[in-house]
Amino acid sequence: MNDFKGQTLSWKIVNGAIELALHRDPCNEIGSLTLDELEKFAEALPCLANEARALIIHSTQKAGFSAGADLRELFQRGQQVDRSAALRGVREFLERIHAVMNTIDAAPLTTIAAVHGVTFGGGFELALVCDIIVADRMARFCFPELRLGLIPGFGGIPRLKRDLGNAVVRDLLLTGRSFNVMKAQQIGLVSQIAAEGEALRVARATASQVGKFDKRTAAAAKAFVKPIPYEELKREIDIFCDLYSRPAVEEGLRRFVENEGVQPYLP
Amino acid sequence: MSAPTIDHTLDEILNLAASHFKVSREKLTPDDDFFKTLGIDSLQALDLLTRLEHHFRIELPDYELQGVSDFRTLAGRIQARL
C-alpha cells in the first residue's frame, strides 16, 4: 500500500521518501482513530521501506506537529467504564502505540521528523522515535504530563534519556515546561533548524542527501548508534498505569477537559 | 552594553504583538489583558512567547507566565531575563 489517505493521517512516496502527513483537527491529538491508522502505517512500513530510502513525518495542521495524546478521549473513556476496565483499556492502548513507535524507531531506513509549532507530549514522543528532528524556527516542545499527575506514556522518557543528558531530561520532565527550538538545538535534540514554514522542505533535502548512500550500510549504521531501550519502555508502561489508577489523575484530566479558559496549554 | 529599560522592553513587546497579530499598535496599552485584546488562546500565547524569546534572545519558561495576562507584567518577566 504505497499510498493511503485516512481520517487522521496519510502517506505516499515522494522522490524516494515516504511522507507521512498528520492531519487531524485541531492539532493531531493522538487517540484511538489515529492509533488505528498508525498501526496500518506500521504494518505497511516493511513494504514501503523496500521502495524508499527515508521516512519523513510531518503535520499539515497550522497549530503544530501534534499536541499529544487525545486527553478528551482518555477522560471520556475512563468515565464510561469502571476503573479496572479503564486501566485495562489504557494499558492496551499504550502497548499498541509502543509497538508502532518501536517499529518506526527500528525501521531500516532513515527517519526524519519535520516539526513546527506545538510538539507536545505524545507528539514530542512521536518525533523522538525519528533519527533526525528538523524543526521550524517556531516549534515548541514540552512534556506536560506531570501537570496531570502522569508521566509521558508513549516511550518519551526512555527515548529522551537515550538522546540527551540526564540532567536536561530531569529539568524538562520535572518542570513540565515548554521550550523553544534554540534550546532544543542547544541540548542536542534538534539537529537542523528551518525558517518559519520551511521544515518540510529542509526535511526533503535531508532525505535526498541520505538517499545517496548505500541503504544497507545506512541501516547498519543506524542500528549500531541507536539502540532501542525495550526494557525501560516496558517499565514506562507499568509506571504510567500505576499512576493512572489514582483518583488524582481523573481529576487532573477533568480539569483539563472541562477548562474553558484561554490557558489550558499553559502551566 | 547596558540592558534596555523596562519601558523600552514593553514598547518592543507591544510592537511585536501588534505586528504579528495584526492589531493596530495604538489600540494596545501596557495594562491590557493580552488574551482579550489580541483575541488569542493559550496555543497562540505560546506562539507569542516563542517570538518574544527569539526577539529578546532569552529563554523564558512558560511557568513564569502563570497568571500573567497583561503586557506590563510580561515585560517585567522578560526584563528579569535580559
Image (cartoon, coloured by chain):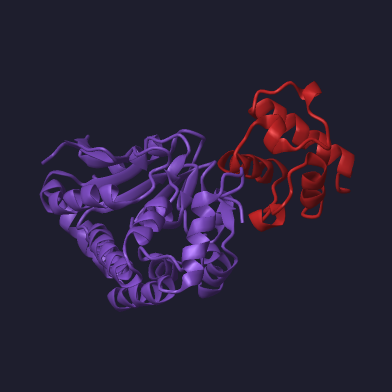
Chain colours: A purple, B red
x and y percentages locating residue A132 in the rendered image: 37, 53
Residue at x 38% of width, y 66% of height? A153
Viewed as shown, does residue B7 lie left or right of A206?
right
Q: Quadrant of the N terminus of chain A?
A: top left
Residue at x 28% of width, y 62% of height? A93
User: What number of labels is visible?
Assistant: 0
Residue at x 74% of width, y 21% of height? B24
x and y percentages locating residue B47 in the rendered image: 59, 40
Viewed as shown, does residue A16 lie left or right of B36?
left
Q: Of A210 and A24, which appears nearest the observer?
A: A24
> Which quadrant of the structure image shows residue A95?
bottom left
Q: Of A83 and A205, which appears nearest the observer?
A: A83
Q: Quadrant of the C terminus of chain A?
A: bottom right
> Which quadrant of the structure image shows residue A223?
bottom left
> Which quadrant of the structure image shows residue A122?
bottom left
x and y percentages locating residue B74 in the rendered image: 77, 46
Q: Of A257 and B70, which appears nearest the observer?
A: A257
Q: Is residue A169 above or below residue A142?
A: below
Residue at x 88% of width, y 48% of height? B2
Viewed as shown, does residue A245 lie left or right of B28?
left
Q: Is residue A82 above or below residue A56?
A: below
Residue A30 visible in this rendered orientation of the protein = yes
Q: Is residue A149 above or below residue A217?
A: below
Q: Is residue B69 above or below residue A185?
A: above
Q: Of A96 and B55, which appears nearest the observer?
A: A96
Residue A206 visible in this rendered orientation of the protein = no
